[in-house]
Image: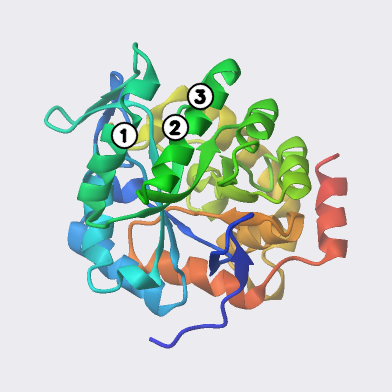
Amino acid sequence: MSTIKTMQRTLGRSNLSISAMGLGCWAIGGPWFWLDGPGGWGDIDDNESVRAIHAALDLGINFFDTAANYGTGHSERILARGLEGRRDKAVIATKFGFVVDEAAKRVSLRTDDHLLHVRQECEDSLRRLNTDVIDLYQLHVWNYPIEKVPAMVDLLESLVKDGKIRYYGWSTDSVEGAREFAKGEHCVAIQHDLNVILDAPGMLAVCEELNLASVNRSALARGALSGKYTKETVFPQNDVRTDSWSRDHFFAPTLDQLVMIREILTSNGRSLVQGALAWIWARSEKTIPIPGFKTVAQVEENAKAMEFGPLTVGQMKEIDTLLGR
């Protein structure tokens, strides 16, 4: 498998050069429980996950985003397997901030002070990832109180000083919160929702102003931008997409509006997925989409989007007009 022409971006204010697209490792964690509902993306094949990680590296993708939550540590372990002997070729991002019960495969909310647990959570992730340093350590608690951010940033700076992490960021859609987190010297990224249907002008403006990487979750609207699903699709009971948030926030609006812009997204021989990624790159020079994957084929399709590159300015304007933005 030959390396395709990859687009490169810098991870915010860091000195890390990464592929313009990363891979989100949520799905490869397999089934788990978030509170009392499904937290994963259905059944997986660990060996295929490892092959997919190898394929990504061979295709020039070097940025992998996981979390302690995903499969209650399983995703981190599988990523470690996939990177064995090639750790130096990868930039690893993971996340922290919840109670992870590996035995019960359940993740729950913290009721006490998060700051008491961050160091232990970091050690746990380092162990599962089989590495001595995490490149990007992200707070996963999207609604963490802004008034508590300075203390969290101080703690993360101490982890940088101790050599446990290189940089840190926050997975949140709070623009105000992002601005506060960015006061930390080694804060380099904000992870937030962004796709062609769900724009985030406020967050992108902050990322551009403060030179932060905009790491984009839901780049494909939980699969709604893949063209594989309709409003009638029924997901397995152990798939997070059975929840109302997936339906109301991603699937319904995306499937309603996709028909208007499909032709533009699939121009020049792109697949729908490749067009959705092309929109994200054209939206800002700070964006780094992290579409999820379960198979080698998905990784190959995603990676090929980098050969096509971003949409044109004209196509971007046309999409805004069609969507009434």
User: Residue placed farthest to the top in the image?
Assistant: 111
Which residue, given by chain and number where applicable, does mark 1 sit on? 119
How far, Cα to Cα, is label 2 from label 3? Answer: 6 Å
Q: Is residue 291 left or right of residue 66?
A: right
Local packing at callout 2 (Cα closer than 10 Å; few below 14, some 14-19, many 20+) is: some
The quadrant the C terminus occupies is top right
- Whether residue 238 appears in this view of the structure is no
Say which amino acid is labelled 3: Ala
**Label at residue 151:** 3
Q: Residue at x 38, y 21 (%)?
A: 114
Residue type indicated by callout 1: Arg
Determine contact: label 1, label 2, CB under 8 Å.
yes
Mark toward the start of the polypeptide (1 vs 3) = 1
Write the residue at 57% across / 55% down: 289
Asked if the residues shown at circle 1 and circle 3 are in contact, with their CB atoms under 8 angstroms apart, the answer is no
Residue type at mark 2: give it.
Leu
Residue extending farthest left: 103
Residue 155 got which mark? 2
